[in-house]
Image (tube, coloured by chain):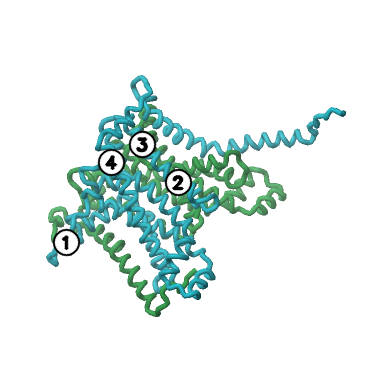
Amino acid sequence: MTRAWLFPTRSFPWLLTALFFGLALIGLTVPLIVGVLWSLVNPHAGWFPPSLVPPSLSLDNWRAMFSVPEMGDAVVASLTIAPIVTVLCGALALPTGYALGRREVPFRRAIEFLVLAPIIMPGIVIATGLGSMFIRLGLEHTLAGVILVQTVVVLPFMIRIMTATFEAVPQDLIDAARNLGAGPLSLTGRVLIPLVAPGLFAGGVFTFIGSMEEFVLTFIVGSPDIRTLPVLLFAYLGGRSQIFTYAAVVTIVLLAPTILLLFLAERALKQEYLAAGLGKM
Amino acid sequence: MAQAVPARVPLLDRPRRAARRRDRWVDLGLLLPGVGFLGLFLVVPLAQVFLRSVGLAVIGQAGRFTWDYYRQFWAEAQYRDGFFFSLWLGVASTVLSLGIALVFSALMQVRFPGRLLISVLYKIPLVVPSLVAAFLILSLIAPGGILARLVFHWGWSWPQLVYDRWGWGIILVQVWHNVPFMMVIISAVMAGIPQDVIDAARNLGAPPWEVFRRVTVPLSMSGISAAALLVFIQVFGAFAVPSLLESAYPLALPVIMQTEMMDRANWALASALGSVLTIASGIVLVLYYRLVPGRGAVVR
């Protein structure tokens, strides 16, 4: 895995350390610190150029979370939609993942392509189709509509991860359970589901994060009535007047759980799940 | 001359055929939730996009086949320029990200102090939504951003990197976002290159740079092509980041589509522009499958 072939000099590894940590400092740490500072700016004093640090700090922007209705609503909307999308994806992907992973299904190539399509297609094109379709169905600007469009773009990740997980289940275990007299129901409930639980968990994490972060389709189908956190962030960053302070608060609210989940799920999110999610690697 | 007697279907085959037929129904039942959902909410709307782009299935008016919307796309400068601007963003972001990701992936193969921590840290941008990435980079490089303030203290002026004609701010956000994504794919392939091959090249006297250029990169081609494909298609069709960081003209094609849809309710033109976007991405995908033969294709 690790090799020292590239530049055999002795000090070279330390140069690499300096390079990568320097980049992490400029590319990750500084922007995150600046983001946190923006969320703590005292709105009465502001933070104008050329000062490098805000003149005074306060928690006013964080209190806005509860006093400004649009922010509270966005948090509620995001935290309502994401779990529903996750459960819906799990329910839809379990049987389909089983069929793709363990059975010889007809038209496999076409089905795999269909599952790959939402991952590589531009979201705006899918939004164009679904937006007009949902206007006809009366689903535009509704919670149900947003849940359905988000499911379209995150379901493929779940199906791919479940397919890879079912493929990896050893046939011996299934045969043994059958020989010991397990019927289809207890085979599913007591053998298969526990065996694929890690994959289901990883897929759930992926789906939850994907739903929390989905923007284009939610924006086009849901706004202005249904506004999730990314849609609100877009409103704060675009438009005539940027509201950096509120944008920073939304950014942190959006970022903290995903980074936390990434670290918590580091073990579960092994390369193979990442691989199944992002295309075969 | 005995007439060939048609072989009779052995009795044994009948239950087997029935079982096979039953299996097909089981397959269908298992596939239906996932595939049926995608069929209903992906294939149907996309088919409508294509129909609408040629004047059929338009909401609230009688359908009539026409190429007018495609003609309009090519005739009016704002749409054409939008297409080429998106193309430029896609190509520039892909080339820059790929160059950086290649070098970094190769360097990550070397053992250095703190490598484990870096290998976790560099994956953070993977889970950062592109809007958050836009905000973080904006707070860094905008005219009032922290870097502009920093160089002001030293008496320098900061270049215009956002809201500019060539979309450098957009490209910077995309590079920040996609270098880690490419590194995940490319370093996985690089780690699989047998050590013997590299040792052989070194023993034959190749300097490190030559080994990188003539051995490592060619042997990582499957990962490189897949990463480049995915990043190009994603940036080419990106809406959020260009919408926030572009200048007034030209607008990226997805941004134009969104305006046509939500502000002017011109779904037919938006559908034609969407079809153009899809066809262009499709051509790139077909080229990829052509150039990367069967087994080597990483995106499947």
Relative image position of residue A228 (x, y in whole percent): 32, 43
* Chain assigned green: A
Mark 4 vs mark 3: give the one in front: 4
The residue beneath circle 3 is B274
Q: Mark 1: which amino acid? A: Arg
**Marked residue nearer the N-terminal end (1 or 4):** 4
**Marked residue nearer the N-terminal end (2 or 1):** 1
In the image, taking residue A205 as reference, residue B148 lies left or right, namely left
- What residue lies at 51% left-to-right and 41% top-to-bottom? A92
Can marks 1 and 3 be said to lie on one chain?
Answer: yes
The residue beneath circle 2 is B287
Which chain letter matches label 4? B
Can marks 2 and 1 be said to lie on one chain?
Answer: yes
Q: Nearer the viewer, residue B24 or B242?
A: B242
Which chain letter matches label 2? B
Q: Colour of chain B?
A: cyan
**Marked residue nearer the N-terminal end (1 or 3):** 1
Q: Mark 2: which amino acid? A: Leu
